[in-house]
C-alpha cells in the first residue's frame, strides 16, 4: 500500500510484554538512586536551541547534524533534547539549586533523548538515558583583616 504509514526510521515501538521489562528497570533505577539520596529532576523534552549550541558547541556533530530542531509559531528555534546535561545545568542554575543548604545536590534524570543518526543495530534516533549528577557548590567566605 502506497499510503501506509509506518514507524519513523530509527525508532521503535515498545510493546506489551516489553513495557513491563522497561518499567521494572526504571523502578529499580529509581529505587537505587533514592537509596543514595539522588532526587529526580524532570526537564522539558525540548529546549531553546541556543542552550545546546552553547553547551555542546555549535561546531560539533551533535549541533551540526544530529539535532531535531524546529521553529515554533512564535518564531523561536527549539530542539528536542539530544542529551540531558545541558537542560540539567540550566535547571540547576535557573532554579538556584546552587544555594541549597543540602550540599552536595544529587540529582538524576531519566527520559527520552533524540538524535538524528544513521540507524545502526542497537542505536536509535529516540533513546532513553539515565544520568546521575552531583554538584557541590562551595561558597567563598572572606575573612576580616
Image: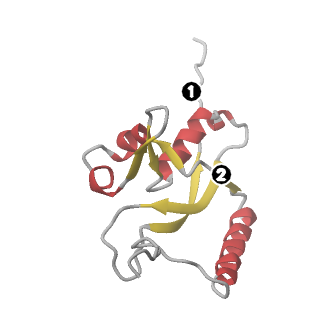
Residue 140, numbered label: 1
Picture layout, residue 8 above or below residue 86:
below
Q: For mark 2, what is the residue? A: 41
Displayed quadrant of residue 17: bottom right
Residue 97, numbered label: none
- Residue 44 pos. (x, y %): 59, 48
Displayed quadrant of residue 36: bottom right
Picture layout, residue 49 above or below residue 9:
above
Picture layout, residue 88 above or below residue 97:
below
- Residue 91 pos. (x, y %): 59, 40
Residue at 53% of width from left, 43% of height from top? 89
Residue at 39% of width from left, 73% of height from top? 9
- Residue 4 pos. (x, y %): 45, 77
The answer to whether residue 137 is visible is no
| Residues at marks 2 and 1, CA–CA distance in whole angstroms | 27 Å
Q: Is residue 115 left or right of residue 137?
A: left
Residue at 72% of width from left, 42% of height from top? 102
Amino acid at each position: 500500500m502506497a499510503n501506509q504509514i509506518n514507524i519513523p526510521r530509527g525508532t521503535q515501538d515498545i510493546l506489551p510484554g516489553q513495557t513491563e521489562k522497561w518499567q521494572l528497570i526504571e523502578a529499580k533505577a529509581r529505587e537505587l538512586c533514592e537509596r543514595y539520596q539522588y532526587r529526580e529532576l524532570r526537564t522539558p523534552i525540548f529546549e531553546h536551541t541556543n542552550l545546546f549550541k552553547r553547551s555542546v558547541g555549535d561546531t560539533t556533530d551533535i549541533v551540526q547534524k544530529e539535532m531535531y530542531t524546529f521553529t515554533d509559531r512564535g518564531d523561536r528555534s527549539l530542539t528536542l533534547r539530544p542529551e540531558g546535561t545541558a537542560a540539567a545545568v540550566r535547571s540547576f542554575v535557573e532554579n538556584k539549586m546552587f544555594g541549597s543548604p543540602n550540599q552536595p545536590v544529587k540529582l538524576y534524570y531519566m527520559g527520552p533523548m533524540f538524535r538524528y543518526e544513521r540507524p545502526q543495530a542497537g542505536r536509535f534516533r529516540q533513546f532513553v538515558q539515565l544520568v546521575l549528577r552531583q554538584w557541590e557548590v562551595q561558597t567563598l567566605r572572606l575573612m576580616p583583616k
